[in-house]
Image (tube, rainbow, N blue to C red):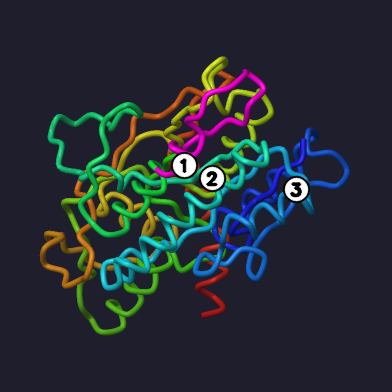
Amino acid sequence: MRVAVTGAGGRLGRALIVALEEAPFTGPMGPIAWSRPDLDLDTVTVESVEAMIGRDRPEVVIHAAAWTDVDACARDPKLAMRRNGEAAGIVANACARRGADLVLISTNEVFDGQRTDNRGYRRDEPRNPANAYGAAKAEGEMLATRAFSGGGPATSPRLAIVRTSWLYGPPGNDYPAKIAAAALRARAAGQPLRVVRDETGCPTYAPDLAEAIVELLAADAITVTPARLAIHHLVNGGRASRVDWALEILRAIRLDVEVVEVAGSAWERASTPPAWAVLEPTTLPSGEPMRAWREAFADAVPGLLRSMGSA
């Protein structure tokens, strides 16, 4: 199976390339890495993506390229819509026209995060984004769905939307790295570390998400036959508040600093993140869920410690 990955230089893109290189179904040539300048979210066109598909002949395209700076998206919602909404629609249209399956990576932020029943968002719940990043990603989902909605035989190209929550992992500059850096500054200044208490989500390790996507591809379960569209919620098991996660980070790196819990409203930022970022997870073909978030984070700790040592 020929698989192309957009945004191959990003957090998830890198993890996908590694996971696909180890997957026997990609063959001796391995995955196809598309990054800039192959695919620039600001300038991409249907014709340019069709040309890449014609050149490299992937059977599946995983569209992981995105503008994930949520605060920057809030400051420039028009650009966010171009990069995360319109560009996704362009890639989807090109894939549908050239007969390639598409896996579109999306986010919990297509939901407003206001639910209070302590349940994760289901795959079939209506989208209701509360910020510019979520609105653009929701538009990308809708445009991709429209591109693949023409019907046709069972052999027609298929679309899968994969949503995740609180993604982290190499190359860093993620929540664990930011908490570690902030904790070091707080300790040096003799001050407590302030952490948001009223945001809850599913910390998800990028290599684990990549492996789950590869498992779906390997089992030909990215869409449920005979449907040509599926939505998957792929997250590490369990849930955590920002405080829970920060305390686990500090414990893992053995950094002793006082933690003070504060409301999210105490932080001045351009975007308003969903307070409830929990997704009800998809059952994988193996029947096993993705592992618990604490277990996954333990695998990320050595890299975090190395980055702290080189900072």
Kind of element beneath mark 3: loop
- Residue type at tag 2: Ala
Q: Which residue is mark 3?
A: 31
Determine the residue positioned at 54% across, 59% down.
11
Question: Where is mark 1, residue-wise?
Answer: 144
Where is residue 243? Give x, y as percent.
Answer: 25, 54
Q: Which mark is residue 41?
A: none
Quote the CA–CA distance across marks 3 and 1. Answer: 22 Å
Q: Residue type at mark 3? A: Pro
Secondary structure of the residue carrying tag 2 is helix
Judge left or right: residue 10 versus residue 1: left
The residue type indicated by label 1 comes to Ala
**Boundaries of the magenta span:** 143-162
Residue 92 badge:
2
Q: What count of labels does the image hold?
A: 3
Q: Which residue of the protein is positioned furthest toward the right in this rendering?
A: 28
Where residue 220 appears, x then y in whole percent?
65, 24
Q: Answer whether labels 2 and 1 touch (C-beta < 8 Å).
A: yes
**Disc nearer the start of the sequence (2/3):** 3
**Which residue is at the front of the view, 16 or 77?**
77
